[in-house]
Amino acid sequence: MGNDVEMGAVLHENHIQVMVSEPENEGSAGEEALLGLSKRPSKEGGAVYRHAVVSTISSFIIFIAYGAALGALGATIPFLQADLEVTNRDIGFVFTSRGIGYLIGTVFSGVLLEGFYGIDFTPSPWWSENKLLMFIFSGVVCGAFTAMVLSTKIYAAVLVIFFCQGLGFGGADTIGNCLLPELWGDELGPWMQALHAFFGVGAVIGPTLVGALGYEMCFIILGITSLVPVMIYPYCISVKRQAVAEQKARLGLEKSGTLSVGAGEGEKEGKHSAIHTENEDAAHEEENE
């Protein structure tokens, strides 16, 4: 048997079927990372489907808060300008500061997930395999710094706070668009559309809350809302562990079934070879006589 045999090839040698498999150690980390996921969660059902649904609900909540915080600033500007006692020119830099934070947050979260030119995470770090946790963290950053605007009347501090809010926006936007394809695979379409629809819902809710309750109460509500996915996260982890256990059990049954079939064929071949050997011995004895 040559060394240039491709992995997974089936060889036939002396009527014996030989399966050349890949080494078990290679790619084991990648296989572990894929456990709990499926290309068609709704068809697989069970804990895999529940994990995808619950994680997606958390994503919807984050995008509602994200859209509301983004849309609320426009309605907040007149009140914020009066509280900070700054000019129209100065208050405009709030948008610039948040935009710069958004740009940096987008790039930085992408680097954390997939690396960059000259930056290669091998093996993949724990955070890149847990996109939901990173997504929730980005949502908390959005909500926390939105509420933190109320803690100061210093113009420079407000610029820094909106910059940090922009970091959360960039992270939430990037990681959310990477998480859902991982959760839903071939069934992604409607779920991705719904995710961005909920962003639009939040963008309508934000200015409405500012007009109805004032920007202070609006920012407090958004800060609290960003904590809801944190409370859901332990359940997401529990369901994912169930999904991993189900898939491992299914893989174990498939492997054991394959081994049983192989063993049965081997026994049959052994019996045939034994009978064939006995017949040959009898024939040789007759010739000698």
Image: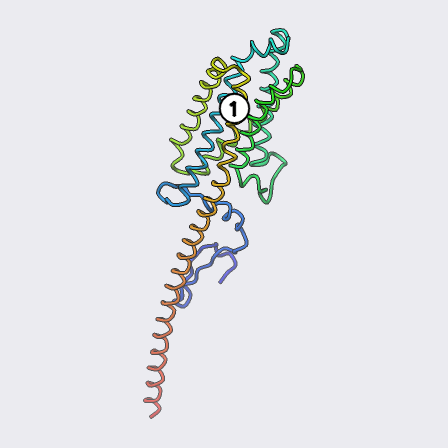
Q: In the drawing, does residue 70 fall left or right of residue 252? A: right
Q: Nearer the viewer, residue 254 or 266?
A: 254
Instruction: Examine the rendered structure and indicate whether residue 277 appears above or below residue 99.
Output: below
Seen at 52% across and 35% down, the residue is 230
Q: Nearer the viewer, residue 17 or 95?
A: 95
| Model colouring | rainbow
Quarter of the figure that contains the C terminus: bottom left
Instruction: Examine the rendered structure and indicate whether residue 12 appears above or below residue 146.
Output: below
Q: The residue under label 1 is which amino acid type?
A: Leu
Instruction: Determine crowd level at label 1: few under 14, some 14-19, many 20+ residues with C-alpha closer than 10 A.
Output: many
Q: Nearer the viewer, residue 215 or 268?
A: 215
Q: Residue furthest top?
A: 87
Seen at 48% across and 27% down, the residue is 63
Residue holding disc 1: 222
x and y percent of residue 274 in the render? 36, 78
x and y percent of residue 8 in the render? 45, 55
Instruction: Examine the rendered structure and indicate whether residue 211 appears above or below residue 12.
Output: above
Seen at 32% across and 89% down, the residue is 286
Element type at mark 1: helix
Q: Residue furthest bottom?
A: 289
x and y percent of residue 18 in the render? 43, 62
x and y percent of residue 76 in the render? 54, 13
The tally of labels here is 1
Where residue 150 sits, quadrant-wise, is: top right
